[in-house]
Amino acid sequence: MTDLATLARELNTLEAVQAALAGIADRTDDARKHELIKLRRDLSAQIAKVGEVAEPIFRAADPGLNQEYRNKFSRMRSAAALHQAAWPAIRLGENIADYKASARTVREANKAFVAWVRGTLSQLQQDR
């Protein structure tokens, strides 16, 4: 599998974890807090995996493109970290509207990052 194909696969996994997290806010069962903790760990691990695979691809690209990648990756990672700090699992169920708004910010940052990387990968694939 090429490095670009590996990154595409890891982006799919990142989206799947994010989608699973999106469903937590609507649940009321007792297991949701434990699942939230597990999914947050999965998200952190997947963000790290995406970075591990993407970093050499973008480092080898144009310096401006590499900087743009780093900025977008940092924005996505920071959005997740800020949300998790503001909304620890113990607070799940408190002020649902605010929680959902915060989680939506993370999803939007994730979607923007993934869309940008996919578009850029398509361009990089054509350049090879």
Image (cartoon, rainbow, N blue to C red):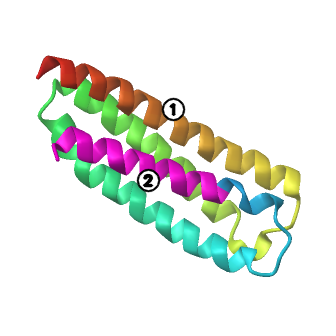
- Mark 2 belongs to which amino acid? Thr
Q: Quadrant of residue 80?
A: bottom right
Helix, strand or loop at mark 2: helix
Badge 1 is on which residue? 112
Q: How far is mark 2 from mark 1, CA to CA? A: 15 Å
Q: Position of residue 125 (x, y in %)?
A: 20, 25
98 with respect to 75 (left or right): right
Identified at 68% across, 53% down, the residue is 22
Labelled disc at residue 92: none
Q: Quadrant of residue 8?
A: top left
In the rendered image, the quadrant that contains the C terminus is: top left
121 with respect to 96 (left or right): left
Magenta includes 10? yes
Q: Position of residue 30 (x, y in %)?
A: 81, 81
- Mark 1 belongs to which amino acid? Ala
Identified at 86% across, 57% down, the residue is 96
Residue 88's place in the image compared with 10, above or below, is: below
* Badge 2 density bin: few <14, some 14–19, many ≥20, Cα 10 Å: some
Q: Main secondary structure of the magenta part?
A: helix
Tell me where the magenta segment starts and ends, as one range: 1-21
Badge 2 is on which residue? 13
Q: Quadrant of residue 89?
A: bottom right
Q: Nearer the viewer, residue 80 or 4?
A: 4
Identified at 67% across, 80% down, the residue is 34
